[in-house]
Image (cartoon, rainbow, N blue to C red):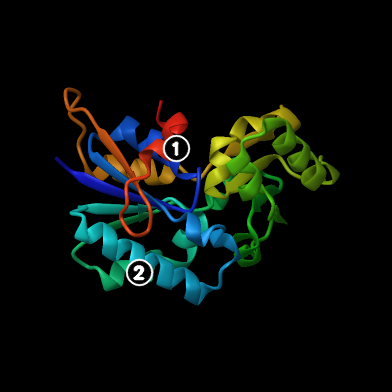
Amino acid sequence: MLTIGIVDDGVGIFPTLTKLKQVVSARFVCQILSEHFPLGNKSGKELYEVGFNSVKKLTELGCDAVVLSSVALSSRCLRPLSLAHPELTIFGCDAPVMHASTYTASNVLVVGDRFVTRSVNLSGVIAEAMPEFPALAEVGDERAIVGYVSECCERLYGQFDCIALANSSMNLYKRCFSRVFPNVQIFDSLEGVARHVRKKYKKFPKDESTVTLIDASGNEISEKYSIFLE
């Protein structure tokens, strides 16, 4: 069976897993790099080192392809890691800025960590860093998340027509953004990678996917995150 590794630093890995399970049957090896949390605070050099070690471990575990679920990791490492591992197919989850821009004639609000928002420099784009979001996502208190989204973004209301989520953990709490902005279109970072994976691999309906969760060293941690696997 096809084996796909997914890499992230926290719970953002689970919406990526759910999306991929809809488009391909595979043995999924999900590597959660909690010791490097949050990845969005790391330098480009540090991100590459983390990505290189992660891909090396997943290759040793027999993965045929790797998905970089973290937007920060994808933004910095997708191309160099693909060049370093030409034998491996590596997919990235990108901030859906261009996709969102085709939807509107006005502005796009891009929300994410500082690494991603600093790298966005496009006309018609408003970048808003939300550095506390990953930690709030790990706790899972949706009331606190809604309050934080409101605190960071409500002052910008009326200045944009859609929102591009540039952090993987935001995909898990997309509904929280909808509560603050109920009439605004919200784009996540998963449609693009799902489309690329679907195009490359054919899904056979009778095949069933399996999921294993590991840490950076390859140790099994599925029980720790069992609530997200139900």
- Residue 50 is labelled as none
The location of residue 53, given as percent across then percent down, is 34, 67
Question: How many numbered circles does the render carry?
Answer: 2
Which sits in the foreground, 182 or 60? 60
Task: Check the image and name the residue furthest to the top.
Answer: 206
Q: Please tell me whether mark 2 sits on a helix, a strand or a loop.
A: helix
- Residue 225 is labelled as 1
The location of residue 36, given as percent across then percent down, is 50, 61
Q: Is residue 88 visible?
A: yes
The amino acid on which the numbered mark 1 sits, given as a three-letter code, is: Tyr
Mark 2 or mark 1, earlier in chain: 2
Which sits in the foreground, 172 or 86? 172
In the image: residue 1, left or right of residue 108: left
- Gap between marks 2 and 1, in whole Å? 24 Å
Q: From the image, tell me which residue sits under label 2.
A: 52
Q: Quadrant of the N terminus?
A: top left
The amino acid on which the numbered mark 2 sits, given as a three-letter code, is: Phe
Is residue 85 depicted above or below 102 in this figure? below
Q: Quadrant of the C terminus?
A: top left
Determine the residue positioned at 20% across, 60% down: 60
Task: Check the image and name the residue furthest to the right.
Answer: 155
In the image: residue 137, left or right of residue 130: left
The location of residue 203, given as percent across then percent down, is 21, 32
Please tell me in which quadrant of the rendered image residue 13 appears: top left
The location of residue 38, given as percent across then percent down, is 57, 58
Determine the residue positioned at 20% across, 52% down: 64
The mark lying in front, picked from 2 and 1, is 1
